[in-house]
Amino acid sequence: MADEAEKTEELLPPQLVNTLQAVLLAESRFLFRLRERTAEMCKVKEDVVAIQRELNHENVVHVARFFFLLKALDCSSPAAIEALIEAHNLKVKRLLDAEDFRFRTRKELQKSVFKDAQQYVCVKTVKEKGRAVLAKTEIAALLFDHMSRDSAVKTIDLLVRAGLLIEEDSDPLSGSNRKLIKTDGILEDTVASYLSDIGNLAIKLNGGKS
């Protein structure tokens, strides 16, 4: 056992081990902050504890990072959301052309491609709302390489129940049943704190050396 420990130390320099510890600590803080905000934001107080337990899942992290990136990439403009969707479509079509089905089946990949009409609606919605708002299935499509469509929808529904995402009608006056998902900044701020924690904790654990 001693020999194995020595080999591990040789393979993993202390600085890398400390950085990994920083990531794990930051993840723990990230989930703690989400649970705290759920206690504040959840409208059905008797569901808080159950929802807090469900938040302990990597899919929650993926969805939170997605909304952080929407803000970081300034996808509140039609041009930005259109560029995001076109880059996504190109990525999916390359996988289809290469017949790369290691992570998603052909059918799942095909469902992830935004058709022209769907892309038009997304861009139009962002233009009208002045912010990055998408339907659950559209978010699920953009997260295809992180989780299945069903998992993405379930995770978004969980975050809505937690009060960390907001679901609203696209156009109540038109009678449209399209539901949009938006954020009031909680997820983005929590991810920003998470990223900051990684850097600060890594420096601290490495004795003040970046």
Image (cartoon, grey):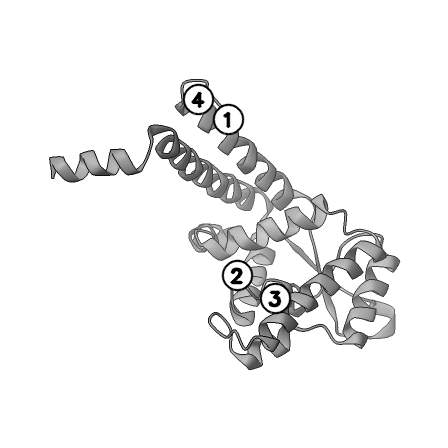
Indicate the secondary structure of the residue bearing disc 2: loop
Q: Do the numbered discs 3 and 4 sit on residues whose CB atoms are within 8 Å?
A: no
Q: Which residue is mark 3?
A: 140
Lower position in the chain sequence, tag 3 or tag 4:
3
Q: Position of residue 177 (x, y in %)?
A: 75, 74
Indicate the secondary structure of the residue bearing disc 4: helix
Give the CA separation, mark 1 to mark 3: 32 Å
Looking at the picture, which amino acid does disc 1 mark? Asn
Measuring 48% from the left and 69% from the top, which residue is drawn there?
103
On the question of residue 43 being in view, the answer is no
Left or right of 136, for residue 118: right
Q: Which residue is mark 4?
A: 204
Q: Do the numbered discs 1 and 3 sit on residues whose CB atoms are within 8 Å?
A: no
Indicate the secondary structure of the residue bearing disc 3: helix
Q: Position of residue 158 (x, y in %)?
A: 54, 59
**The disc label shown at residue 200, or none:** 1
Looking at the picture, which amino acid does disc 4 mark? Lys
Indicate the secondary structure of the residue bearing disc 1: helix
Q: Do the numbered discs 4 and 2 sit on residues whose CB atoms are within 8 Å?
A: no
Measuring 73% from the left and 47% from the top, which residue is drawn there?
73
Quarter of the rendering containing residue 3 = top left
Q: Nearer the viewer, residue 170 or 131?
A: 131
Measuring 56% from the left and 77% from the top, which residue is drawn there?
108
Query: In the picture shown, does residue 106 fall above or below 136?
Result: below
Q: Which residue is mark 2?
A: 146
Lower position in the chain sequence, tag 4 or tag 2:
2
Q: Do the numbered discs 1 and 4 sit on residues whose CB atoms are within 8 Å?
A: yes
On the question of residue 7 being in view, the answer is yes
Q: Nearer the viewer, mark 3 or mark 2?
A: 2
Could you classify mark 3 by the number of other residues whose Cα lies within 10 Å: few (under 14), some (14-19), or many (20 or more)?
many
Give the CA separation, mark 3 to mark 2: 9 Å
Could you classify mark 4 by the number of other residues whose Cα lies within 10 Å: few (under 14), some (14-19), or many (20 or more)?
some
